[in-house]
Amino acid sequence: MIGRFFAGMIWPVFAFAATAMGQSTNACINLLHFKAPGVEITRAAPLADGNTDPNPYGMPGRSGPRPANCRVEGVIDRRTGKGGEEFGIHFALALPDKWNGDFLMQGGGGANGVVLPPIGQVAAGDTPALMRGFAVVSTDTGHKSHGGPFDFGFMKDQQAFLDFAYLANAEVAALAKQLIAQFYGKAAAYSYFAGCSTGGREGMILSQRYPKTFNGIISGDPAMRTGFSNLAIGEWIPVAFNQISPKDSTGKPIIDQAITDKDRKLIADSLLKQCDAKDGVADGLISDPLACDFDLAVLTCKQGEDDACLSEKKVTAIRKALSGPKTSEGIQIYPGFPFDTGLTVTSPTRGLLVPGPGPFGPPPSSTEIDVEKRALAVTQPLVDPMSTNLSTFASDGGKLIFYHGDSDPWFSPLDTFNYYKEMAEMNGGLESVSKWSQFYFVPGMTHCEGGLALDRFDLLGAMVSWTEKGIAPESVIATGKAFPSRSRPLCAYPKHAQYKGQGETEDAKNFECR
């Protein structure tokens, strides 16, 4: 009797689930017939639980298990452009069966050109957005890569360049919202954007040019002035090191011998000795980069010394390199880089004190650079997200979080920080702006992740609580593979993690934002 009773109770549940599943499948397939000007839906198919798609660039992702979802793919404004090449804004949208009611757009990386798996893993800790129930969309921003993540050949086509610079993400977001509303029968309650590097730049663009598109935006390590950052890391720094490099038989600088392993260890040890314990504990992390007062001059060899010290020429060259490009009159063109633990790291991402070939090719062999001339040539007004007037975004209830790795060797965290300060000044001052925007330094982290860092943190969850519940984050807990048993609070500027003075130093609960 008991078995029959429960069987009678369970059957209607299974029947209801099967009916709901059938309705969801039909709703998904019906999206193939979605009509909008310039839009082609090329795929609309239910996907069962499983692993996420592989990253097209072969980079590691935080995958699976992927929840059951409706995968929608398509293209906006397919066309033939310059040189007969086919262009169009391709996208992929994941609509989970168990929807939380919200929408997230994930940013791109490098030159884009591929549609990355729509899972939303940036600044989401160990649980990407799709696994939390967000509907997630991704896009190639209007072109196809033919040569890896830094293929900028598409820029020869004006429309493709404009799509990449600022148009594509807003168009895809608008379309994704329509598809979400049709599939679920109601609009998304809240819309979010999260991206790092190029995705960080895209987030800034959206807050500045499309202030009503997203309720919350997370911008990490933004590639916000690529021309100037390339001038710094691709020209200014190598030229400074060329001046102290030994020469080969043709007189060409051997830049990878400018600074030795011994030099790097000396610098790293001295830096930690000076700045590591300022947060109350010596743990290999510099929690407050702005308070680090390390000066290379202390390592200068005195007369008669040649061991455990640096020559005056090396000290001068390193200080010049890390101070950032300046004109002959001393005008700062791009900010310098903070002293942090990643400066001397040799792999997988080389620190700035490990000179050699960069992501865009071999370093120059010159020993001089015309900064004024180069600065004029690298300005990119359509791409650079430098507008600081966010009054509409703020008044509409928008929330904006920045984070940047202190050891990022491609884009200086001080450039992002300077923008944040200028934006705060433009919009009523830091106290006022902190009610809707925050900035987080990430100690030790290189570009977007990695390094001697705690590089896993859930800013997405913090953003949702702030946007939907009005709970402003003071900190989020950070962990990472570099320190497997350690946790720390990641604190919003102007605070940093400080040890309380007692308790296990590996546990975040014994630290406070101060």
Image (cartoon, rainbow, N blue to C red):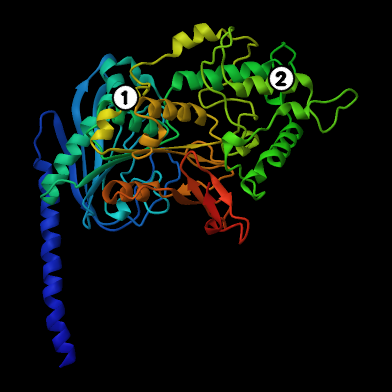
Label 1 neighbour load within 10 Å: few <14, some 14-19, many 20+: some
**Which one is closest to the eye, mark 1 or mark 2?**
1
Kindly state the secondary structure of the residue where label 1 is placed: loop
Q: Position of residue 302 (x, y in %)?
A: 85, 25
Residue at 60% across, 37% down: 342
Q: Give the labeled residue for mark 1.
A: 389
Contact, CB < 8 Å: mark 1 with mark 2? no
Q: Position of residue 270 (x, y in %)?
A: 73, 37
Q: Which quadrant would the N terminus be assigned to in this image?
A: bottom left
Mark 2 nearby-residue class (10 Å; few <14, some 14–19, many ≥20): some
**Picture layout, residue 182 above or below residue 292:** below
Earlier in the chain: of badge 1 and badge 2, it is: 2
Residue at figure coordinates x 45%, y 9% from the top left = 377
Frontmost residue, 513 versus 227: 513
Query: Residue 278 appears in which quarter of the rendering?
Result: top right
Identify the residue position indicated by label 2 in the image.
316
Q: Amino acid at mark 2?
A: Thr
Quadrant hosting residue 304: top right
